Amino acid sequence: MRAVIQTSVGGPEVLFVAEQPDPVPRPGEVLVRVKAAGINPVDGAVRGGFYPLLGEPPFILGWDISGTVAALGPGVTTFKVGDEVFGMPHFPKQAGANAELAAAPTDEIAAKPAAIDHEHAAALPLAGLTAWQGIVRHGGLRAGQRVLVHAGAGGVGHLAVQIAKARGAYVIATASPGKLDFVRSLGADEVIDYTKGNFVEQVGNVDLVRTPSAATMSTSR
Ligand SMILES: NC(=O)c1ccc[n+]([C@@H]2O[C@H](COP(=O)([O-])OP(=O)(O)OC[C@H]3O[C@@H](n4cnc5c(N)ncnc54)[C@H](OP(=O)(O)O)[C@@H]3O)[C@@H](O)[C@H]2O)c1
């Protein structure tokens, strides 16, 4: 298969395409023919050597994938060849998403909804799970609560706004001036230009805050 690999850490210029052995799915895994791979901040940090999750290069970056099941590993019964799937396999170990083929445990992928294409599906897993874990699993957001989503136009933030709204919350989100309409279009009840004034005075009391710098959430009341 062809893959985007790197043999040293650095900027985007360290990435190049090379022939690599096809991955062999282990028991409980499927082989996915990758149609699209998502890129997140963690990819740049690992590529640059600031966050050495994968140790020393050479390695293949990428975790978010969307594609088609090309082969089944031993014991797999929940998917069949040809199924369209997406997910975030093997994190924080190497998944090798930036390649034509990637092996994925069946409990780390899901059926791709027919309503979204591979590009959108591949953009969802890491950012979507980060937003979901913050808002729902750790934050325990309930209908009627007020939530403040910082960086509401960002990769994680724009999903957090939609998840919070879908769970019946009153959503306040911060964004830069050019993105306020976008965040409003996602369902935010109030949008705040973070370049102007003191957002604390504009927000008032909230039940939950999604911080801009990480997946963590905190209650403020
Ligand atoms: N993406 C992931 O899967 C993921 C997973 C775990 C953790 N994280 C972490 O979560 C953070 C955000 O990641 P991301 O992928 O969402 O990044 P991103 O798409 O680059 O979004 C960052 C956002 O921050 C906003 N921003 C900048 N300064 C701000 C300020 N002073 N107040 C409010 N918002 C401000 C920007 O808003 P404007 O565009 O409106 O200027 C931008 O949309 C990063 O620290 C990342 O490492 C990301």
Image (spheres, rainbow, N blue to C red):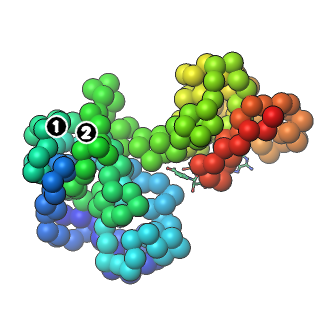
Q: Is residue 75 above or below residue 26?
A: above
At 70% from the left and 31% from the top, the residue drawn is 147
Q: In what quadrant of the picture does the C terminus appear?
A: top right
Residue 220's disc is: none
Q: Is residue 51 above or below residue 168?
A: below
Q: Is mark 2 within 8 Å of ligand 1?
A: no
Asked whether the beta carbons under mark 1 and mark 2 sit within 8 Å of each other, the answer is: yes
Q: Is residue 176 above or below residue 103?
A: above
Between 215 and 186, the one nearer to me in the picture: 215
Between 81 and 191, the one nearer to me in the picture: 81
Q: CA distance from mark 1 to mark 2?
A: 9 Å
Q: Which of the 4 image quarters holds residue 160?
A: top right
At 19% from the left and 50% from the top, the residue drawn is 29
Between 5 and 95, the one nearer to me in the picture: 95
| Element carrying mark 2 | strand
Count all numbered tags in the image, as a single digit: 2
Residue placed under numbered mark 2 in the picture:
85
Residue type pointed to by label 2: Val
Q: Earlier in the sequence, mark 1 or mark 2?
A: 1
At 49% from the left and 60% from the top, the residue drawn is 42
Q: Nearer the viewer, mark 1 or mark 2?
A: 1
Residue placed under numbered mark 1 in the picture:
79
Q: Which of the 4 image quarters holds residue 170?
A: top right
Residue 159 x/y as whole percent: 53, 35
Q: In what quadrant of the picture does the N terminus appear?
A: bottom left
